[in-house]
């Protein structure tokens, strides 16, 4: 396992996705390039590009730079980027849809954005389109999960995330008032990747099933959300990774990647970081127990619920594994939040 310290500020990186064709990489003298997102800033300042010099060994030759975007009227109205994915010439960023660790849910975290992939290779600000959901994705995911047996939302979580959000919407007569309902679960999206059919697969860190298994939900109309100002998110299939996580150590999704088709690499791990007064863990202390693992699974073409997975790598005492991307040679790259810095680690397979 090779490790490289990435000079990125703020030091909170999430998710990882591969970008650029081989020809584009070669024009710049690179052989690998990834995008990650930084979650302690606005969407327009959240992108970072990680590149590797062609011919350099994998334990060196890496560099990172921030990509600044122009978001127009949506500037300064978003926060907490947690997931990224690339398809058909665009890079997509997704807010967590969640809230701070003590709640309430935040409309500033309820968004999706995209930039043209080609635009990030140059210098200067790049145009960014942002769709602000105002809890519309929260509503669509909760409706999709309605008949699923989920880990019960504890009293602290219900008060901090659901009741407090509803009260704020009513008190301030927010446009989204009524979108969050008393029976809802807060959702924390920390991973995203496209299926072969064009649906965006959302990996939830929270909630998980009552048996502690990770949950994925398909967002069906990504293109429509950008093309039609009146469109609302529409979610379809729900998937459960039935052999990841357990009642004693529930596991949520932290990262997703695919090299095509419907075979996915994922990182699963704890439901929230321990030692940071997280409301989720106050209700469910067992949510801090799951170790981080790199797993692989395949989704069948038909709709369904439970799929199996296999473990690719166990991270031991390394907890904050935030992103995964597998290159064309089969080597796995991970972005990891470590104390005071962001690290890119590469697992080289013989």
Image (cartoon, rainbow, N blue to C red):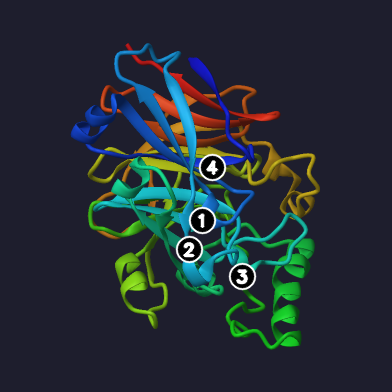
In the depicted view, which residue is nearer to us: 97 or 3? Answer: 3
CA distance for labels 4 and 1: 15 Å
Residue hosting label 2: 71
Please give the label number shown on residue 227: none
Mark seen at residue 44: 1
CA distance separating discs 2 and 3: 17 Å
The answer to whether marks 2 and 1 mark residues whose Cβ atoms lie closer than 8 Å is yes
Identify the mark nearer the N-term, 1 or 3. Answer: 1
Residue that extends furthest to the left in the rendered view of this protein = 23
Mark 3 highlights which residue?
107
To which quarter of the image does residue 30 belong?
Answer: top left
Q: Determine which residue is flagged by label 4.
A: 14
Q: Is residue 190 visible?
A: no
Q: Gap in Å between the C-alphas at discs 4 and 3?
A: 20 Å
The answer to whether 11 appears left or right of 258 in the picture is right
Task: Single out the mark in the foreground, 1 or 3.
Answer: 1
Q: Is residue 227 above or below residue 46?
A: below
Asked whether disc 1 touches disc 3, contact meaning CB atoms under 8 Å apart, the reply is no
């Amino acid at each position: 396992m090779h490790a490289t310290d990435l000079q990125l500020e703020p030091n909170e990186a999430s998710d990882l996705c591969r970008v650029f064709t081989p020809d584009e990489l070669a024009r710049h003298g690179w052989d690998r390039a990834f995008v990650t997102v930084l979650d302690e800033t606005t969407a327009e300042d959240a992108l970072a590009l990680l590149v590797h010099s062609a011919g350099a060994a994998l334990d060196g030759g890496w560099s990172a730079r921030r990509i600044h975007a122009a978001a127009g009227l949506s500037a300064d109205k978003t926060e907490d980027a947690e997931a990224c994915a690339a398809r058909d010439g665009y890079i997509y960023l997704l807010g967590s849809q969640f809230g701070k660790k003590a709640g309430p849910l935040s409309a500033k975290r309820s968004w999706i954005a995209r930039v043209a992939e080609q635009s990030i290779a140059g210098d200067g600000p790049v145009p960014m389109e942002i769709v602000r959901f105002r809890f519309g994705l929260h509503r669509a995911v909760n409706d999709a999960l309605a008949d699923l047996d989920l880990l019960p939302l504890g009293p602290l979580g219900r008060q901090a995330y659901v009741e407090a959000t509803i009260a704020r919407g009513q008190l301030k007569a927010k446009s989204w008032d009524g979108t969050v309902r008393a029976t809802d679960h807060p959702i924390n999206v920390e991973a995203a990747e496209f299926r072969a059919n064009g649906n965006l697969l959302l990996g939830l860190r929270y909630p998980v099933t009552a048996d502690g298994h990770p949950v994925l939900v398909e967002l069906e109309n990504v293109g429509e959300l950008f093309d039609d100002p009146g469109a609302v998110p529409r979610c379809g299939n729900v998937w459960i990774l039935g052999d990841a996580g357990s009642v004693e150590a529930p596991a949520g999704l932290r990262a997703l990647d695919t090299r095509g088709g419907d075979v996915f690499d994922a990182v699963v791990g704890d439901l929230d970081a321990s030692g940071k007064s997280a409301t989720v863990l106050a209700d469910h202390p067992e949510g801090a127990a799951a170790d981080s693992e790199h797993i692989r699974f395949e989704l069948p073409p038909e709709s369904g619920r439970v799929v199996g997975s296999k473990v690719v790598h166990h991270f031991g005492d390394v907890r904050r594994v935030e992103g995964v991307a597998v290159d064309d040679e089969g080597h796995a790259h991970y972005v990891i939040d470590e104390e005071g810095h962001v690290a890119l680690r590469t697992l080289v397979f013989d």
